Amino acid sequence: MAEIVVREAIGEEDVEAVRMLLERYGEYLTANPHGAHICIGSYAEELAGLPKPYAALLLALIDKKAAGCVALKPISQSAVKERACEMKRLWVDAEFRGLALGRRLVEEAIAWAKRTGHEAIYLDTVPAAFPEASRIYRAMGFVQVERYNDNPVADVMFFRLGL
């Protein structure tokens, strides 16, 4: 049985593993007909600057091999009127799909948000580009809400989970 660990990315080796995973995320968006229109113009700069702008990067390891990740960042209370964070960049590498790792990463993101005193967790997604992730969000109790950020993508949907 494979050893699965999901933990906060700490140190340059972990951040580099997240960076590698997020490079694949970007490649997926570029190649996917539903994701190609998603703006990732400053994505290279974002990857180079990791762990910023995020408050936490969670890294999933299977038998010590980087398998998936998710990022969390605070949201301004002027945008959502509560102490909240945003879940971004949920990604599971292709060879590790089918192991419920996406759900596990979301569970750990929720646990992190609760531990750090957040009242809610938000996300935006394009269901056509990420159908499985969208199913996970709904199954875990996220509800669709009005736009809370300036994401310019036409097909984007916004979700919130109260904690």
Image: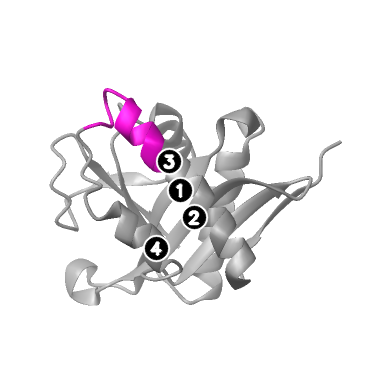
Q: Mark 2 or 4 closer to N-term?
A: 2
Residue at screen point 37% across, 41% down: 26
Q: Amino acid at mark 2?
A: Arg
> Furthest-right residue in view?
1
Q: Is residue 32 magenta?
A: yes
Query: Could you classify mark 1 by the number of other residues whose Cα lies within 10 Å: few (under 14), some (14-19), or many (20 or more)?
Result: many
Q: CA distance from mark 1 to mark 2?
A: 5 Å
Query: Could you classify mark 4 by the number of other residues whose Cα lies within 10 Å: few (under 14), some (14-19), or many (20 or more)?
Result: few
Q: Amino acid at mark 4?
A: Ala
Q: CA distance from mark 4 to mark 3?
A: 15 Å
Badge number at residue 19: 2
Q: Mark 4 or 3 closer to N-term?
A: 3
Q: CA distance from mark 2 to mark 4?
A: 8 Å
Residue contact between numbered discs 3 and 1, judged by CB atoms under 8 Å: yes
Q: Amino acid at mark 3?
A: Tyr
Q: Bounds of the magenta span? A: 25-36
- Along the viewing direction, whichever of 16 and 127 lies nearer the viewer: 16
Badge number at residue 48: 4
Local secondary structure at mark 1? helix
Q: Provide the residue designation for mark 1.
A: 22
Q: CA distance from mark 3 to mark 1?
A: 5 Å
Question: Residue 42: image x %, image y %?
Answer: 24, 55
